[in-house]
Amino acid sequence: MPDPDLSARPAATVVIVRDRADGAAELLMMERAATMAFAASALVFPGGRVDDADHELAASIDHGLAMEDAVARVAAIRETLEESGLGVGFPADFGGARLLAMRKAMVGGTSFASEVKAHGLSLDLTTLVPFARWQPSGRSGDDPSRAFDTRFYVARAPLDQEASVDGTENVRLFWRSAAAILEDCDAGDGQIIFPTRRNLERLAQFDDFDSIAAHAHAIPVEKVTAWIEERDGVRHLCIPPHLGYPVTSQALDGVERG
């Protein structure tokens, strides 16, 4: 099993879950713009790389978490607002026009940390539940600029908020159950890279946010670093078997990569 790439840049992603009374919970998915360097045109969860300012904001919050974890949660909250307009981790009464104005200010160049301070907000980092952590091995010859140490979180969808595309990094967003997303992609209606597929398969085992969160709490978060292994004469991309994933290998010629 390969060692993780120590040069990988920290990043954070959040799976936003919206419960339904008449079926499996829906997840917020977005389609990346075709012009993006990483995962172009792929369906992804909101997220992105950690910024320097995320460290400063995390240090100003009383959270009781390991600092790297807290910084990643701040990045996930910031990226979610930038990419979808949703205020995960925000006070319940902070939404609507104020959230829209905050997002607009950030598009104009104002930092997330400055906006949080200007509005006197107290972010609740505990609304994000650690789910997984994926990091490449750094031995595949891939472009090192695409190597990310990504922490995945799950969070309940904020009430009475509407998601909207940012028009730059993503061109479409929608709510769909994990199983339905997988079915759509298998039918050719969407592309998902290897980590996204594995996480959707894991999420599809559960019907609501509480079940997903309980599962996440029960499984230790360890770095998932895939490796290539030949099985019955076919090269497979594999992941460890003990981290809650129902499918732990896929034939390499069928793997979508970023």
Image: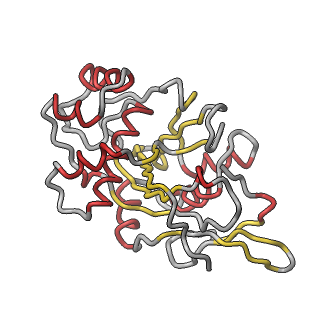
Is residue 46 depicted above or below 154 in this figure? above
Q: Residue at x 19, y 38 (%)?
A: 91
53 lies left or right of 92: right
Is residue 183 depicted above or below 235 in this figure? above
Q: Name the image quarter holding residue 84.
A: top left
214 lies left or right of 143: left
Q: Position of residue 212 (x, y in %)?
A: 41, 60
Q: Name the image quarter holding residue 235.
A: bottom right
Q: Position of residue 245 (x, y in %)?
A: 55, 69
Q: Is residue 73 visible?
A: yes
Is residue 86 depicted above or below 195 in this figure? above
Q: Position of residue 63 (x, y in %)?
A: 18, 56
Q: Residue at x 29, y 20 (%)?
A: 101
Q: Quadrant of the N terminus?
A: bottom right
Q: Position of residue 157 (x, y in %)?
A: 35, 42
Is residue 140 depicted above or below 182 in this figure? below
Q: Residue at x 68, y 44 (%)?
A: 191
Q: Name the image quarter holding residue 161.
A: top left
Q: Is residue 211 visible?
A: no
**Residue 39 vs residue 232, the one in the foreground:** 39
**Residue 64 vs residue 138, the one in the foreground:** 138
